[in-house]
Amino acid sequence: MDAILTAVIPVVIIGVICAAVLVIASKLMAVKEDERFPVVRECLPGANCGACGFAGCDGYAKALCENPDTPSNLCVPGADAVSKKLSEILGVEFEDVVEQVAVVHCAGDCNKTQDKFVYHGIESCAAAKLLYGGKGSCTYGCLGLGDCANACPKNAIYIKDGTARVNQRECIGCGICTKTCPNHIISLVADVEKAVVTCSNKDKGAVTRKVCSNGCIGCKKCERVCPSKAIKVIDNVAVIDYSKCPDCEDFGVCAKNCTTGCIMISDLSGIHRFKEEEEK
């Protein structure tokens, strides 16, 4: 018995001392946390998409608490509802959120283009791109294997006829798909916009025409007819300057005059706008 006590007692004493040291250290070395942080973090949707420019929702919440100059309207997925809550908690003026939706700059489906070979491999756009730029004749276009659809947290993207399509009514504008696409043909635009160039091919017109009937051939007809000078052909493909597009005197004239029909006019209103209209 004495032998057992001799072994146990020192261990117990050492354990008590270590516990005391840890308690004292936790008090002396504790990092004070802003009491507003958990409340602010709770307001954010938790998408951790990085659309705000910070490393996830924790990073944005920390920046809001520590830096008063951090805008409270950077959470696109949360939209105005989150911005209003943040302004109330932080005691700052409400700032409107520019709601955004994803658009795919490629409409080269199986009816407008063709494959250059039969692909048998991993069902991943990133993997397929490693093999001669993908199976499609247009190496700039949608690879069609659904990396963006798999990454979308709201299932707002689907594959139809070999190309990705976005259901803007379900899109929260998180931008995860834009980072996932290996060909970078998905971008975010304000959901009040109407015109979209559905092509990303930077080859010269004759080359583009051979691989896709929907491709932009860089003819600059849209550029010439646009009254707002909102369209420019850059690297052989039309690009819209949305800061000028709303002032268009003859809206839709670009799409009407597009030689190949790669400029689309559509209602891009997203889920946030529909919720606002329902509340009204």
Image (cartoon, rainbow, N blue to C red):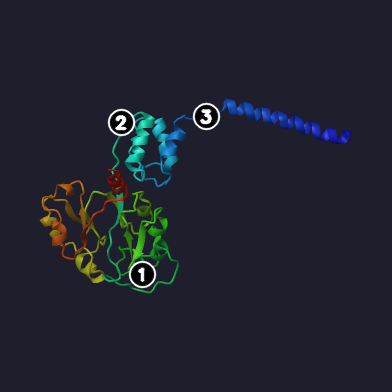
Location of the N terminus by quadrant is top right
Sequence-wise, which precedes: disc 1 or disc 3? Answer: 3
- Residue type, mark 3 in image: Val
Spot occupied by residue 265 in the image (x, y as percentages of width and height) = 20, 57
Sequence-wise, which precedes: disc 1 or disc 2? Answer: 2
Which callout, 1 or 2, points to the residue nearer the camera?
2
Give the residue at mark 1. 135
Q: Please give the label number shown on residue 93.
A: 2
Q: Please give the label number shown on residue 13.
A: none
Is residue 105 shown left or right of residue 249? right
Q: In the rendered image, which quarter is residue 135 located in?
A: bottom left
Q: Residues within 10 Å of mark 2 (few under 14, many from 20)?
A: few
Q: Is any part of residue 81 visible from this angle?
A: yes
Q: Is any part of residue 220 visible from this angle?
A: no
Q: Is residue 203 placed above or below 52 in the rendered structure?
A: below
Give the residue at mark 3. 31
Q: Is residue 210 placed above or below 56 in the rendered structure?
A: below
